[in-house]
Image: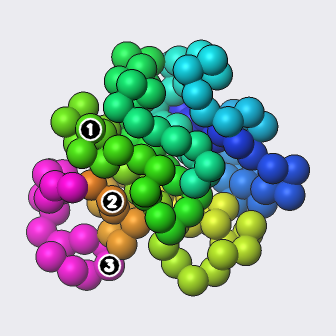
Amino acid sequence: MKAVAYNIKDYEKESLAIANGKIHDLTLISNMLNLSTIHYAYGKEVVIVSEDDLLGAELLEELQRAGVHKIVTRSITTQHIDLLRAYALGIQIANTPYEDRSPKGIAEQTIRNLNLWGQGKCVGLACCCVKECKLENLSTRNDGTK
């Protein structure tokens, strides 16, 4: 998948690169995601953000116009994302909900989400969509729940 990761700190770069293993076309940007930096998202399927990136309705609409269909937040919380507007725009949202909050753990969770989406699968516990997934032939999430 083609993805751009915003608000990347120096200590996150190596972990993301190693976790990615050159599988995805991943661009790392140190700038926060906002209307003046959104141009980095053009041509990308996925945007990866931090909890410091505020994704309100206007920014989500611009991301959709840029061609973004999926967003991964490198946080447990999604309070910085307007989930209802994302749903209305057809943008899928995932977080990094697992206990390992180290840079390596968060990077692995982020890339796991990209891998699953790339395979057309649900991201399981990381799914933050406000609707039921409608992926073809999906009867249970990857975590075994309905």
Q: Is 60 on the left-hand or right-hand side of 84?
A: right
SS assignment at label 3: loop
Residue topped by disc 2: 128
What's the CA distance linking mark 2 and mark 1?
13 Å
Q: Is 14 on the left-hand or right-hand side of 53?
A: right
SS assignment at label 1: helix
Q: Which x, y percent locates residue 113?
A: 47, 57
Q: Residue furthest right?
A: 10
Mark 1 or mark 3, earlier in chain? 1
What's the amino acid at mark 2?
Answer: Cys
What's the CA distance linking mark 2 and mark 3?
14 Å
Residue topped by disc 1: 85
Seen at 40% across and 41% down, the residue is: 70
Residue topped by disc 3: 143
What's the amino acid at mark 1?
Answer: Arg
What segment is highlighted magenta in the picture? 130-146
Residue 40: name its quadrant: top right
As drawn, 47 above or below 11: above
Seen at 56% across and 20% down, the residue is: 35
